[in-house]
Image (cartoon, grey):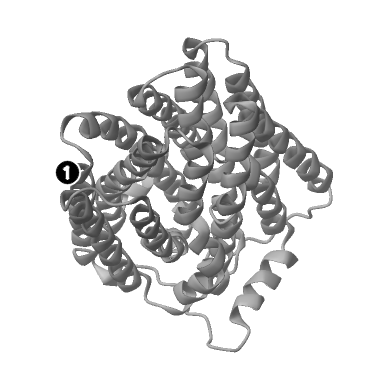
Amino acid sequence: MPSAMFRSFSSRNFRLFFVGQSISQTGNWLTMVSQTLFVLGRTDDNGIAVGVLTACQFLPVLLLGAWAGLVADRSDKRRLLLVVQSAAMVKSLVLAAAVFAGGPPLWVVYVVALAGGVTTAFDTPCRRAFIAEMVPAESVPNAASLNSALMTGSRVVGPALAGVLVTTVGFGWTFLLDGLSYVAVLGGLLAMRTADLHPADRAATERGGVRAGFRHARAVPELWVPLVMLTIMGVFAFNFAVVVPLLAKTTFGGSDQLFTALFSMLSLGSFAGALWSARRTTSSVQGVVRGSVFFGVGMAAVGAAPTVWVAFPAVVVAGFASMVIMTAATALIQTRAAPDYRGRVLALQAIVFLGSTPIGGPLVGAVCDLFGARAGFAVGAAACLVAAFWGHRRVRRIPAPAAFAG
């Protein structure tokens, strides 16, 4: 029998999913980080330009996320993931071809990032909801935590590889490697035993399905409070793609390698936070509140770090706390949302977290341009503490919940 931390690996389908996603998500981070390095190189380290790139990557989540969640609730999730992952593969191959053709103008990178955002909008709620179909109900929180560990582990390896590959073989081969990495996740999905899945009942095709998902989230305090907290932190604190490269290059005067090293340390902390969360069998709003305070302290420590050697452990702390928050919130949604609303509520989570980036990215980038990258971290720290204070005031009003773990 597997240990408590890895009990979800007893499911063959989850093992296939985990391996395929590990490879594909590492490739995805190759492209995410390489796009940032490309824009920084073309714009002389302009914070607003990086903020615009981040907005392009996540604006579709804001615009399409709710509808994408409804599509996930009404679809065969494995088949939908096959379509979405295939589209993401094409996107990366197109970007690689554009670089090999002679170096694309900046607007081409923005358009490809926008296309990637469309695939993210559909992939995120579908992938997270599909986790609950691969394992028994009692293993869903563990599977969610292991998936978070997977995502953050790819954030450790991907940026480190990007820093090496961009300087040795160039952007084109880096983007091509990402495109080829999707073969792993597509193969895993095709190899699954569909008879072993635990599909939720598909949502009815009534009118107002998106609004019904919002009403369901609003009516369940254990869903609504984390969603509001994630909105506050998503706008002002979870802008690592903007503040980390600017801290590395403008505050500490480092190179692309310093940026990728800092990002990898941040992701290492996130990976540790996900593994720590995997040992827990329950999640609560109180856990999200405590994690928000911890995250705020970590962000403040990074912003105040006098040297890069102090910043390294501080970003590990910030990464750890950020993943504790995200894992707890995701597990709450997967266990407290009714099964036929799960995709829509997970889409709301993606909207308030990823979809808030198009708003917060340029704003925080402008703050960094005006006052320095340290100010960007200070804004994030303040947002975490505000979210924690708001959530704490409402925790005592939350009744004992009835879980929907079907």
Residue at the spot 66% in from the left edge and 30% down from the top edge:
296
Q: Inspect this view and state whether residue 142 appears.
A: yes
Residue 54, percent from left and from top: 48, 48
Residue 141, percent from left and from top: 50, 49
Relative placement, left or right, of 75 versus 311 is: left
Hey, which quadrant is residue 256 in on the image? top left
Depicted 158 relative to depicted 197: above or below: above
Name the residue that disc number 1 marks: 173
Depicted 313 relative to depicted 128: above or below: above
Nearer-the-camera pick, 124 or 258: 258
Q: Secondary structure at mark 1?
A: helix
The kind of residue on which mark 1 rests is: Trp
Depicted 345 relative to depicted 354: above or below: below
Nearer-the-camera pick, 337 or 209: 209
Relative placement, left or right, of 269 versus 352 is: left
Residue at the spot 66% in from the left edge and 51% down from the top edge:
231
Quadrant occupied by the N terminus: top left
